[in-house]
Image (tube, grey):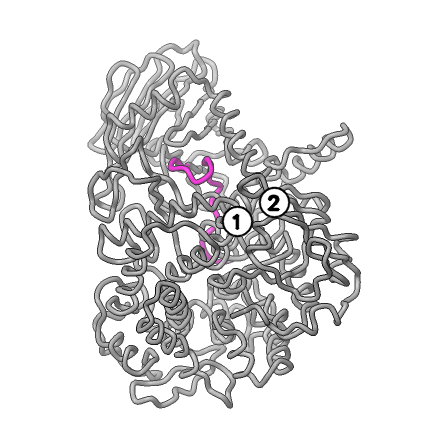
Amino acid sequence: MQKHLFFQLLVALFFFGGCRPAPEDYMDPAIGNIATLLKPTRPVIQLPNEMVRVYPLRRDGADDQITGFPLQVAAHNDGALFIMKPSSRPLSPAEWQRRCTYDPVQEVIHPWYYSTMLIEDSIRVEFAPGSKTGVYRFSFPENADRKLLFTAPLNFSGNTFTARTFFHGDVPVYVYGRFNTAITAGLVSDTLSCVRFPHRKERVVVLQYAISYVSTTQAKQHFQKEMEGRDMETVIAEGRGRWHAVATQVQVEGGTVAQRRSFYTALYRCHERMVNITEDGVYYSGYNKKVNLARRSFYVDDATWDTYQALHPLRMILHPEQEEDMLDAYVTMYEQSGWMPTFSRLYGDHPCMNGFHSTVIFLDAWRKGLKIPRMAAAYEGMRKNALSATMLPWRNGPAGALDSFYQAKGYYPALRPGDTETVAGVHPFEKRQAVAVTLGHSYDDWALSQLAADLHRYDDQRLFAARAENFRRLWHDSVRFFLPKDNAGRWIMIDPAWDGGPGGRDYYDENNGWTYLWAVQHNIPALVRLMGGEKAFERRLDELFHTVPAMPRYDFWHRFPDATGLVGQFSMGNEPGFHIPYLYNYVGAAWKTQRQVRMLLDLWFKDNVFGIPGDEDGGGMSAFVVFSSLGFYPVTPGVPVYAIGSPVFRKATIRLPQGKRFTLIARHCSEVNQYIRRAWLNGEILHSPFFTHQQLMEGGTLELEMVPFPERRWGASIHAPLCR
């Protein structure tokens, strides 16, 4: 709270001084550092999509003690390596375990710079990242016994050191480091090192280092390339410059300071992943467990269940060439491992969640004109996943009995309440997730059918187009939910708002049946018809937002801890619901989309430590904030169309490749004026609450006239003409 107040005062000083903060100054990695229920979002210090990531090791933003400072965090929210802690106390077993108290008021966090004061030790700690490097600066008190404790064995030579460790069991991680002063150092045990600085008059100690997944020699080359001859101020300035380039690609005017802070922080979060691990033309791959020559930049660390909806589509606008590299990396991962990955980690594919949503990402990129030279190989990998891989949640490998059942019957069979699991491969906690698996793979198969048609694979097109309709098999017409069936084809009559065990995982996944009621992005007209038409669909959406859980919230969250950010039964804090507020556009009630999106942004995405309502997951949720704050959203990745919402800024300009600009002007936009009265695209009257990706990428202007009360007629005569 103190930092937030300081920033507000700083902003006021800028304004009274006749200037405004640079866009990157609104980026605050501390936003969201206290989780609603689950994992906090970490204050990652990193250059955009680069390999070296660092954050102070603490429980969350409410923790006033730090365990240590890593030289590298190898994966999103995981893999802190070469952890160190400065100390001026006598060395003892207790000192290795002690956590350091810091002063939150004195902590400074930017994506390109970090500083904190360890108040019990009077030690200032600063950090700045490079691409494959980093620099720490420690300011010790006068005449202190200055030392750094490392939870890693280091090899010393003069004032330099090297080390190697392993991440996730078999990924080698190398470090080369250099101090700016003389040291005395040694191993305390097999896993602990201590570095002392004997010249007590030199209060400031600087540690520059480089990380490699290839070799110690490669780490030293990174050091020479990025750190040799540079001081910390230069590294800070270069890092800020990198983030300035990101921030100025989307320039906004208007809105409140809080809205700009939330927006630019979300934009920063969208550049955390994937990360480029290419090292001077080579890279280590966890998919074949060796060092490879790089065809082009090789990226890892993605979560397609989270990122296919908005993060990949955002990158296709802002950085299409980078997205092409990332998709090419997916093809390489398939060629090296034999499967198209779902959660592409540094160490290989992480069998997480369900579905093969990389298929949707490839279709989306293909339809938006991105270059995918190895599309034939990509298609081969996606087809193999669809026909030969297990669909079991949180499992990798070849198809089994339940998958064969799906291939034959068109739905994933569920167990009845109280039945004992009979299939050995089912994850003991994640369960079958039978409805969620059926719905997710219907979307994936639709995407594959679309690609097959474009690639003239017409037998595949017919096969996967038929499977894309499998969602219909679980629609219960009288209950009006997607419900599970057993292996005999009989309905399992459950309470879709409550049943299914922890996270509803017997039938759904992390959310209840209200969320999965809308999981048919690929065929919204069919979903409208299943619900009885446009008015019935609109009423059902209203019901979603207005129906509160029938049990106390602590009971609900005990069962569904991921379903945070609740508005009625809608969960803003979990990925499957991101597109739902925009569905009003498809039944002529665009004004309700405008109202809901504005309310959700204001309610759940504040510019403070509580400002992320669920697991952020490295850009998935933040991309929703970026799109929605700008005023549009990709409801159906794979269909190059955007649904219009309600922008929070009076003007936003997106700098596109090849020098083009797309400008969105919201006349009279304010916290009150949130409804669209009229719209124009490039000067032509726009009646529909949609526009295309091509119209965006060609550049131009979308102009909206904003008013304080709903204009029900705008968008009402256009009923989802662009969603297929």
Q: Quadrant of residue 432?
A: bottom left
- Whether residue 548 sits left or right of residue 322 in the image: it is right
Across and down, in percent, residue 723 comes to 54, 69
Q: Is residue 51 visible?
A: yes
Q: Quadrant of residue 275?
A: top left
- Whether residue 292 sits left or right of residue 38 in the image: it is left
Across and down, in percent, residue 651 comes to 70, 47
Q: Is residue 555 visible?
A: no
* Vertical order, 308 against 121 (above or below): below
Q: Nearer the viewer, residue 16 or 121?
A: 16
Query: Residue 654's mark?
Result: 2
Q: Residues within 10 Å of mark 2 (few under 14, many from 20)?
A: many
Q: Label 2 is placed on what type of residue?
A: Ile
Query: Residue 317's mark?
Result: 1
Q: Give the magenta part as a residue range.
A: 37-53
Instruction: Tell me how far mark 1 sits from mark 2, CA to CA.
Output: 9 Å
Magenta stretch holds residue 46: yes
* Vertical order, 276 against 34 (above or below): above
Please report contact status of discs 1 and 2: CB closer than 8 Å, yes or no: yes
* Vertical order, 379 against 104 (above or below): below
Q: Earlier in the sequence, mark 1 or mark 2?
A: 1
* Vertical order, 165 against 701 (above or below): above
